[in-house]
Amino acid sequence: MRHLIILVALLAVAGLDFIFVTYSPTAQSALTFAVLAFLIMLLLGVAAGSRARSAVDFTVFMSPRISHGLSGFAVRLGLGTLIPLVLLLAASFAPDLSGPVETVELARTLTIFWMVTALALVGVALTFFWPRTGIYEAVLVGGIIILARSLISWIKADADRELLQLALFGQMLWPSLCLLGAWVGLALREITECHLYLADGKESHDATPEPPEAMQAGYPGATPLQADTADAPAPPEIVFLPARPEDRNRSPGATK
């Protein structure tokens, strides 16, 4: 069910993108569709996380400040945003570097590639370790990157509001990548839990010792009662002798 919810969220974002590009490519529509797409991913991420039922805790080696409470939520968002934000800053200011144009463009392309990879890996890590909250946390990380990108454009290029709104919908790629990575992390966690469950069942089956009574009884699977019965001596056989002729003619009440 969780996989279906995530798939519906991604398809909804793709549908909104198609509607925007085809019918209403204006600044106001871009802002409306971007906010609507982000809310769809966020709410469906919360719904998918609420259905998580995990019996294995992979965060036992982590600090409680990361795993629990509101402070853990803030720390996870900060750590998840750190590397993509640094790569975003590097990609934004790479064209200002002095050097050959081809080298600068190559460096900027590689930086954007690693930022996209980092966003997907953030979604994988958050959902793998925290399946209940990791999905919508990954979407929030993508939203923070969108806000940072808009702020950089406003500071550096002095872009007006309409240009920022038009670029806003195109930047919905970032939370979509985070959600896609969360989908992969969810699948990896389910596969890992399945392997651990099968391994524990096999170990418990192999570790069950055969009772010594069964070995004494001479056949496997014997119960202790069957083993004691097999070791006990057989009861004596009762033999009935034929009656003598004089005993046949004697009346039942006669005495000798």
Image: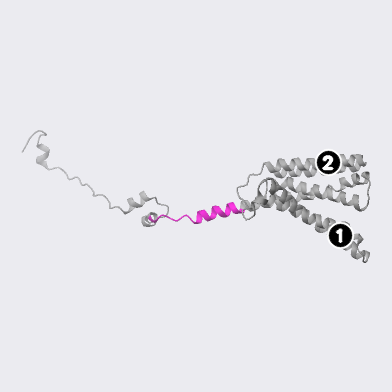
Q: Which residues are magenta?
A: 195-212
Q: Position of residue 230 (x, y in %)?
A: 33, 52
Q: Could you say which is closer to the camera, residue 226 or residue 156? A: 156
Earlier along the polypeptide chain: callout 2 or callout 1?
Answer: 2
Helix, strand or loop for the magenta stretch, by majority:
helix
Q: Is residue 173 magenta?
A: no
- Can residue 107 be seen here? The reply is yes
Residue at (93% x, 66% y) in the render: 100
Q: Position of residue 222 (x, y in %)?
A: 40, 51
Determine which quarter of the picture holds residue 209: bottom left
Q: Which amino acid is tagged 1?
A: Thr
The spot of residue 143 in percent (x, y) is 80, 47
Seen as rendered, the residue at the extreme top is 253
Q: Give me the C-alpha separation between circle 2 and circle 1.
A: 28 Å
Q: Is residue 229 left or right of residue 169?
A: left
- Give the camera-side residue of 71 and 60: 71
Q: Please state, as top left, top right, bottom left or bottom right, where the C terminus lies in the image.
A: top left
Provide the residue designation for mark 2: 35
Q: Quadrant of the N terminus?
A: top right
- Characterize the local packing of mark 1: few (<14), some (14-19) or many (20 or more) Cα atoms within 10 angstroms: some
Which mark is nearer the camera, 2 or 1?
Answer: 2
Check disc 2 and report its element: helix, strand or loop.
helix
Which residue type does callout 2 highlight? Val
Count of residue discs: 2
* Residue 179 in view of the camera: no
Element type where label 1 sits in the image: helix
Circle number at residue 200: none
Query: What's the residue at 87%, 47% (across, down)?
Result: 170
Which mark is drawn over residue 109? 1
Question: Which sits in the foreground, 240 or 46?
Answer: 46
